[in-house]
Image: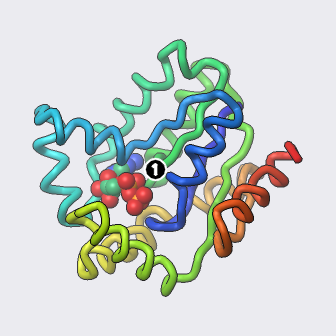
Amino acid sequence: MHIILFGPPGVGKGTQAKILSEKFHIPHISTGDRLRMEIKNETDLGLKAKVLMDAGNLVPDDVMIEMIKKVLISPDCKNGIILDGFPRTVAQAVALKKIFEDLSITPRKVLFIEVSVERIMERLVRRGAMEHRVDDSPETVVKRIAIYNNKTSPVKDYYAQQGLLSSINGEGTVEEVQQRMLTELGVQ
Ligand code: ADP
């Protein structure tokens, strides 16, 4: 079961992805977490990504596409994955379609989590204070939301046209949102 979680920063994709991953025994692939690991290990990629991420910018498509290709080819991902943070641009979505086709994978669904902008701001700034994430400062959050609107939100139309998109109301408790996702997936 290959599931893509999609939505603005701060809607709770990571939290929901972890729960789905445990429930279905398939890996949770977060491109943000992978990039933060590269930064921690001070790899070449990490050093380049850090400057972009701290400023709220996206990491270039070719870098991200290469990263996700390597992940999807690995045997652990054969039975499914919960993809969180990719694709973030239409070019990434087009590349992902090709990778899936080459591996004979049919994605089950793209779950789009919707939350109001006010709630997103509130959550991200709180997370920034708790996790010391430089990219969660109020100014950078505003920039990330603008980049989301320009570059990432067209991905929603791309998947809607393919009939893969399901919108999920992301307001409420973690359990309520999880239940809505399971219903969309036809699991419960
Ligand atoms: P959030 O969950 O708040 O959206 P993430 O942890 O998913 O944050 O991502 C943090 C940062 O990592 C992004 O702002 C971006 O700079 C970089 N990043 C993650 N995934 C991608 C991607 N698919 N394409 C480009 N940049 C990415």
At 70% across and 32% down in the image, what residue appears? 24
Residue toward you, 44 or 38: 38
Q: Position of residue 66 (x, y in %)?
A: 35, 30
The image quarter containing residue 71 is: top left
Question: Image quadrant of ligand 1?
Answer: bottom left
Screen quadrant of the N terminus: top right
The residue beneath circle 1 is 85
Residue in the picture at 61% in, 18% down: 78
Q: Is residue 151 above or below residue 126?
A: above
Image: 23 above or below 17 = above
Q: At 44% from the left edge and 54% from the top edge, which residue is drawn? A: 89
| Mark 1 surroundings: few (<14), some (14-19) or many (≥20) residues within 10 A | some
Which residue type carries mark 1?
Answer: Gly
Q: How many marks can you see? A: 1
Q: Is mark 1 within 8 Å of ligand 1?
A: yes
Q: Position of residue 33 (x, y in %)?
A: 35, 44
Q: Is residue 142 above or below residue 53?
A: below
